[in-house]
Image (cartoon, rainbow, N blue to C red):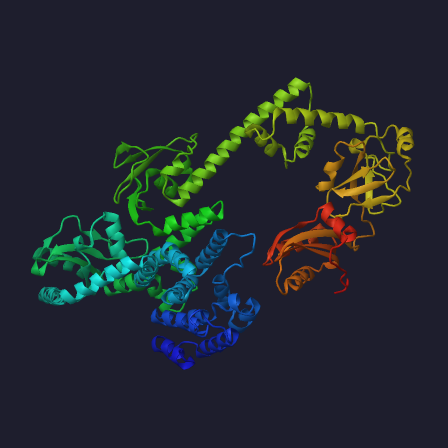
Amino acid sequence: MMRQYELVERVLAYNPKADEALLNKAYVYGMQKHGSQTRASGDPYFAHPLEVAAILTELKLDDATIAVALLHDTLEDTDATRAEIDEMFGTEIGQIVDGLTKIERLNLMSREEAQAENLRKLLLAISQDVRVLLVKLADRLHNMRTLEFMPMHKRGRIAQETMDIYAPLAGRMGMQDMRSELEDLSFKSLHPEHYAAITGRLAAMEQSHREIITEIRTELENYLSEKGIKAEVSSRLKSAWSIFSKIERKAIALEQLSDMIGFRVIVDTIDECYHTLGVVHTKWKVVPGRFKDYISVPKHNDYRSIHTTIVGPSRERVELQIRTHEMHAIAEYGIAAHALYKEAISGDMGRLEAESQAYNWLRTTIAHLTQGDNPEEFVEHTKLELFQDQVFCFTPRGRLIALPRGATPIDFAYAVHTDVGDSCVGCKINGAVMPLITQLHSGDEVEIMRDPDHVPPPNWENIAVTGKARSAIRRAVRIGAQQRAHSLGEQVLMAVLERENLTLTDEDVAALAARLDQPGRKEMLVEVGEGTITAEDLSREAAALKGKRRRKSKLSLPVGDNAEGWFSLRQGELFKFRMPGGQHSSVKRFAALVGFDFNMPVSVSREGVVPGDRLVGILHQSGTMTVYPIDSDALAHYHDQDVGWIDVRWDLAGNTDRLHKVAISMHSANRPGALAQISSAIAACDANISNLVMRALANDFHELIFELEVRDLAQLTDVLATLKRTPGLTKVQRATVLQASAITGMEGVFETKLDTEQ
């Protein structure tokens, strides 16, 4: 295992101004926190962060990034906290370490959902600070180097995830060396027999072609020197995975490949790149169709180089890559070679985005990916965006649009703008009208023909290649279907009302929606249009609503002191009451019916109400009244009962500092410290716990029901929002009446009374 001073010396070798104290403190802290933990190989766990740091020193990264490498697993695998790391190393390092920490997987999350949520968190963190990506790739590279120590059933999953996500991500950032090693290590695990065959062939070829390689390199250097060009010529073998994928893609045998060995020609300036190209093409014959100029049109990962293939010395086909030293550094190390790191201002994300096309592409792609509708779509779209090779097309005004290989004009339209995609009805490619299913090629000029009233058909989703286009098509189709269903639902409602000779006000329609368990008029009409709610359901509930209105109109309350009809009751000092609509007649009949008097008992529903809640009162035939929040689930029970529905409002004169009890519920993972974490979150909002009920939902999951004391709805909303952000909690909400009843009425349940001053 690397010693502390060895790591510091590595960093000082390329950055003499590095913060030695920071590196030493991170080394000691990481070693202490990981303590006696070991890896699957049996090595001390801290050897892993050290190796990650060593990989990053090879990229010559800043001391803060090296410190993050030493700390990157502390939040996830030790008792370290974010607050502790922020205090010791600063919020910048704490934020990067947190971005590298996986979200805790709960029982309600499948492996796929957990993978998607962790990937989403990682990409969002990368969009804020690209150093998160560099540490994560180094972390994955070391894990792949030691993959043989993992259980067999995990190797394939980890290798496939590396091949699908991390290797392409390294490639998109221009880090070709790291990408090649990740791909080859994954290939070795996924297809060991193919890997052994190809690497064996490469080793034999390198041995047998050693003299030819030396001859070609010497002749190229000498000839370029004669023409006044100082060049460094080196040879390289293609990676095992790139050879295998080419064999698979072209359906050819290994023996038929002719470009497994390539040569790089590195010169000082861009002018010398093109001078070298001219000299080489003049001296040797060119293989047609094998020329690409990535200096004029760089790839999206900032890669720049000239590619050409010639029939060179010894009549061998020679693949050449011509580039400058700066281009070569970016080709090998990608975004890690960016000048911003050398200036130690890597936190300037705006400037990095402007100067690095790769990082600009990444942030734009992440913005599109995070709009996915569900975790499975997110992972699918991420793979599509990262893995596909690219083609470069142009708008009529010359704007360059990069798309995955196999993309169609539909993908092009959505890449320009979502509105352009939604309104696309046709296209011209290089001036000729072409079908929308046409695959685009590099250099195509694409003009989109539009109709503002057009709605994309569902089958476009099968034609589109990019995740952005597919998501936008799916969203547009869903919105269009909802609009059609809403229109049809409106027609059905009008027909039902006409048939039943009913008239409903807007308030009546809202009440009708509530009776049908819909949040509002729009949602109800969409359900009617889709057939989920039938015309018979509408007719029955509308008629019942009118009948209930007639019954309730027989009930009335006395007129209060003001013109609006509000009055007080002695046992309801916090509230004012009024009959809906301000009805004031039939006082004697009502009093005789329910035995009304101003001493009528007034109670609050078991789930509790707080200032800020909209309220409703239920006047029972027994002569008692219960006050409910307007959205209480218990109110559905009274829809068809002969009770009075009373308007209620708060009357807090002289009681503004009073605390009010309310019940909340949540699901929590059963783990040490969970209850303390929840209590701390509630206390942080200045709320008080007066009672608690716990019941097991599964061996490792509990339902918790708290009775809190809060001032008002704003404080309660703050408590709920804080708990929803607390790890390990789900379904945080106000409790139902049935759940709240457990606080005082459930038997056989573990119940804990908490000190109200705790």
Image position of 567 (left or right of 298): right
Q: Quadrant of residue 2?
A: bottom left
Q: Viewer-proximal residue, 242 or 659?
A: 242
Residue 79 in view here:
yes
> Picture coordinates of residue 207 (x, y %)?
16, 67
Residue 297 in view here:
no
Image quadrant occupied by the C terminus: bottom right
> Picture coordinates of residue 742 (x, y %)?
75, 51
Q: Viewer-proximal residue, 167 or 601?
A: 167
Image quadrant occupied by the N terminus: bottom left
> Picture coordinates of residue 32 (x, y %)?
51, 77
Q: Viewer-proximal residue, 158 or 398?
A: 158
How many badges with numbers are in the image?
0
Taking the spot 48% from the left edge, 49% from the top edge, the residue there is 375
Taking the spot 12% from the left edge, 52% from the top edge, the residue there is 286
Image position of 453 (left or right of 630): left
186 lies above or below 451: below
Furthest residue to the bottom? 5
> Picture coordinates of residue 648 (x, y %)?
79, 40
Q: Quadrant of residue 461?
A: top left
